[in-house]
Amino acid sequence: MSTANDASSNASPSTMDAQLGEFETLEQFIIEQEDRFPHSTGSFSRLLRDIGLAAKIVNRDMRKAGLIDIYGSTGETNVQGEVQQKMDALAHREFVLALRRGGECCLIGSEEHAEAIPLNTKVEGGDGDYIVLLDPLDGSSNIDVCVSVGTIFSIYRLPDDHDEEEPTLDAALQPGTEQVAAGYVVYGSSTMFVFTTGNGVHGFTLDPSIGEFLLSHPNLTTPDTGNIFSINVGYHHSFQEGLRNYLDWLQEFDPETNRPVKTRYIGSFVTDFHRNLLKGGIYMYPATQGNPEGKLRLMYEANPMAFIAEQAGGRATDGHQPILEKTPEKLHQRTPLFIGSDQMVRRAEAFLQGEPERAETLKT
Ligand code: P6P
């Protein structure tokens, strides 16, 4: 089975379209993986199918953003107090519809909805064993200026001691280590679906000509170090001293240790994360004056991306503890986030904890 990476570089565009049987579809891959997924009854495969369907619909509408009325804001503010973009509301609606119709999800937590959304899955004859937490469209303020954005999702099992017919929020408030799957969709120069179930990270590229996500990046791993750091340096005045020292270290001139390190920050977490995952790098959103707990949300941004980062050989921390081990208390709680290449995140931690000398044995 080839992947896009194997495709001949001199192939003409017409032959670059998938030939039947040349690539593995997302659905085929998930079904193949089923025997590696505990308690698999096909329900999980159908759940990922539902998420993939919603992503294709969001992708379709996003690619026409300048032609249909989805630029700009709805005039509402979401539970975060942020102006809701029209595309935020559309994406939220598509994912809720797909999950409700699919019947495998019993509870949704969404950035775009203050409360958890129970689905009467059991009552309507579905399996409904899964909980999905999601940021339907991260970075949506970038849509009006044609900058890549993304969807992030996290999947948990409904705990056995919870009412299947009336699941409540506390069933969703599980530490990141309990995730059964996590993934993101990046709507960029191409549209990719990247996910893990704890057996490595796998990337699928959408072939719009057949409407299928095709396996293009099997067993994705991230370099253990890199030469990119992503942070909004505009908040430098409010960074803690250890972080300022780390940023100064990254920008010192020392060719022997591959410094200065480049900065790349486009204000779209999924896109910054995806680039750093493939090339090596670190994304940081620390506590700031405006966001004293950090800006990124634990349950549907930090946790799913931390699961992916760790499965790809990277690392994710709040500066003091692994993201996945944090005990959640609220659906929309925020956390400081340092995520990416293992050696870069470890060095950041050493500086943040006031022990920069601890980093001397680390790769740059
Ligand atoms: P700032 C988008 O709103 C987002 O949640 C992330 O996608 C992005 O990395 C960050 O916020 C940008 O925030 O404060 O740098 O504009």
Image (tube, helix red, strand yellow):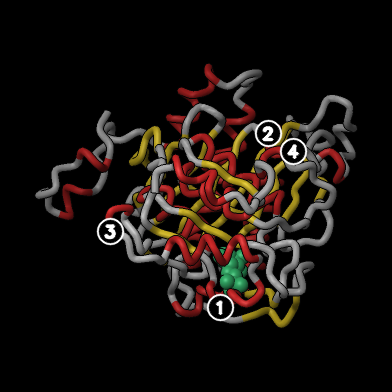
Give the distance between the C-alpha atoms of the residues marked 3 and 4, in whole angstroms.
41 Å
In front of the other: label 1 or label 2?
1
In this picture, residue 275 sits left or right of residue 242: left
Residue 338 vertical position relative to residue 62 in the rendered view, above or below: above
Residue 93 position within the rendered picture, expressed as x and y whole percent measured from the top left: 67, 60
Residue 125 position within the rendered picture, expressed as x and y whole percent measured from the top left: 78, 32
Q: Can you identify the residue that label 2 sits on?
A: 177
Q: Are marks 3 and 4 in contact (CB under 8 Å)?
A: no
Asked if one can make out residue 87 in the rendered structure from this viewpoint, the answer is no
Q: Can you identify the residue that label 4 sits on?
A: 175
Query: How many other residues sit within 10 Å of disc 4, few (<14), some (14-19) or many (≥20)?
Result: some
First along the sequence among labels 4 and 1 = 4
Q: Can you identify the residue that label 3 sits on?
A: 255
Q: Can you identify the residue that label 1 sits on?
A: 234
Amino acid under label 4? Pro
Give the distance between the C-alpha atoms of the residues marked 3 and 2, in whole angstroms.
39 Å
Q: Are marks 3 and 2 in contact (CB under 8 Å)?
A: no
Q: Is mark 1 within 8 Å of ligand 1?
A: yes
The residue lying at 87 percent from left, 35 percent from top is 165
Amino acid under label 3? Pro
Amino acid under label 2? Thr
Give the distance between the C-alpha atoms of the residues marked 1 and 2, in whole angstroms.
33 Å
Q: Is mark 2 within 8 Å of ligand 1?
A: no
The residue lying at 68 percent from left, 34 percent from top is 177
